[in-house]
């Protein structure tokens, strides 16, 4: 019985690499111009072996075509290495971006802040604003203040307006915008272009819609046409309203409970974003339902054709 021999261990990487460039005795002799004498033992073995057509050999060692070895392909090695190390990094960065976006959405949903005039979208505002307080110092009415730490780490020390404390009076020139060095507050051509949000009137709480007469919000509004009266009752035009909060402050002085509230632009953006996502999901689900229904119809049609063919054959 033949004894089972264990396979020889595979040579290491460096040995195989060196052996690839190591010259054989025949190659050394060819380089020196010597002719090797044939070995009698090899001649006898070759005589017993079946004859094969002579192969054309190239005696120039440097012109021999080298077989491409994938193991030593540097380009492939670099590609695999970059893919191996870069994929976790990219995934980690993407996870951090997603977590930041979720945190911003959470803050937008729970902590509605009224930003100064000319503020860009909330996510871009948090990235652009350097918390330099330039807009705070430029405001002549001290309407802009820093967000406290209790509102969250991401919005901490960012400028915002509390209309119940001190609303924005939409002063001439809007110096807060020109003072911003970061581009977080963009200039506007006219007051009606400011979009901090808009006011919402609760008619059930408004005295003007009851038995009393009140036009305090109409008189104090700094934006012409944002609040007007129809049959001695205030009406808010959301397209013109800038969300400055003056009407909310005025209402709190004459109307209890408060009948006017300000919906900040960040809340409006969040609601629009949520609505778009819901519409996209509904569209995708509708397409999937249509595809499934089409597949079912195709299956039923194929079954009917098979049954009809079987009846004809029978």
Image (tube, rainbow, N blue to C red):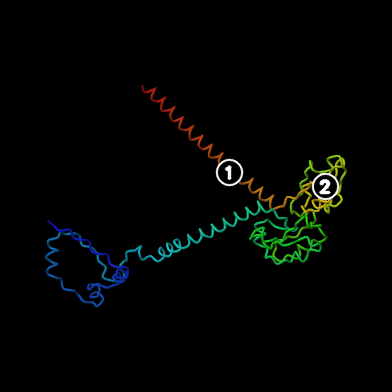
When the figure is inspected, residue 196 is found, relative to residue 283, above or below; the finding is below
The residue wearing badge 2 is 255
* SS assignment at label 1: helix
Mark 2: few/some/many CA within 10 Å (<14, 14-19, 20+): some
Quarter of the rendering occupied by the N terminus: bottom left
Residue 9 as seen in the image, left or right of residue 190: left
Kindly indicate the quadrant of the structure image that contains residue 57. Answer: bottom left
Kindly indicate the quadrant of the structure image that contains residue 14. Answer: bottom left
Residue 283 as seen in the image, left or right of residue 144: left
Disc sitting over residue 261 in the figure: none
When the figure is inspected, residue 24 is found, relative to residue 280, above or below; the finding is below
- Looking at the image, tell me whether mark 1 or mark 2 is earlier in sequence order: 2
* SS assignment at label 2: loop
Report x, y in % for residue 256: 81, 47
Report x, y in % for residue 202: 77, 43
Closer-to-camera residue (38/213): 213
Q: Residue furthest bottom?
A: 32
Report x, y in % for residue 126: 66, 60
CB atoms of marks 1 and 2 within 8 Å: no
When the figure is inspected, residue 240 is found, relative to residue 287, above or below; the finding is below
Report x, y in % for residue 50: 15, 58
Q: Residue at x 79, y 51 (%)?
A: 248
**Which label lies toward us, 1 or 2?**
2
Disc sitting over residue 281 in the figure: 1
């Amino acid at each position: 019985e033949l004894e089972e021999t264990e396979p020889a261990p595979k040579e290491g990487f460096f040995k195989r690499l060196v052996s690839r460039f190591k010259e054989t005795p025949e190659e050394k002799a060819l380089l020196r111009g010597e002719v090797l004498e044939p070995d009698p033992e090899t001649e006898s073995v070759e005589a017993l072996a079946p004859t094969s057509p002579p192969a054309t050999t190239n005696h120039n060692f440097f012109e021999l075509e080298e077989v491409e070895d994938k193991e030593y392909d540097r380009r492939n090695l670099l590609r695999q290495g970059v893919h191996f190390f870069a994929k976790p990094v990219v995934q980690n960065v993407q996870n951090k971006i997603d977590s930041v976006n979720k945190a911003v959405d959470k803050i937008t949903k729970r902590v509605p802040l009224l930003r100064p005039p000319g503020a860009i979208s909330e996510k871009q505002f948090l990235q652009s604003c350097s918390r330099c307080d330039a807009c705070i110092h430029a405001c002549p009415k001290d309407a802009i203040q820093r967000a406290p730490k209790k509102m969250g780490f991401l919005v901490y020390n960012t400028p915002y307006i509390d209309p119940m404390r001190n609303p924005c009076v939409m002063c001439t020139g809007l110096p807060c915008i020109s003072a911003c060095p970061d581009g977080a507050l963009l200039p506007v051509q006219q007051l009606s272009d400011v979009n901090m949000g808009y006011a919402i009137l609760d008619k059930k709480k408004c005295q003007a819609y009851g038995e009393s007469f009140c036009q305090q919000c109409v008189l104090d509004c700094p934006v012409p046409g944002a609040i007007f009266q129809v049959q001695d009752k205030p009406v808010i035009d959301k397209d013109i309203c800038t969300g400055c909060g003056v009407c909310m402050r005025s209402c709190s002085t004459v109307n209890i409970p408060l009948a006017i509230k300000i919906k900040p632009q960040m809340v409006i953006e969040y609601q629009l974003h949520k609505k778009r996502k819901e519409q996209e999901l509904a569209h995708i689900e509708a397409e999937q339902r249509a595809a499934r229904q089409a597949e079912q119809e195709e299956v039923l049609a194929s079954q009917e054709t098979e049954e009809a063919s079987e009846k004809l054959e029978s």
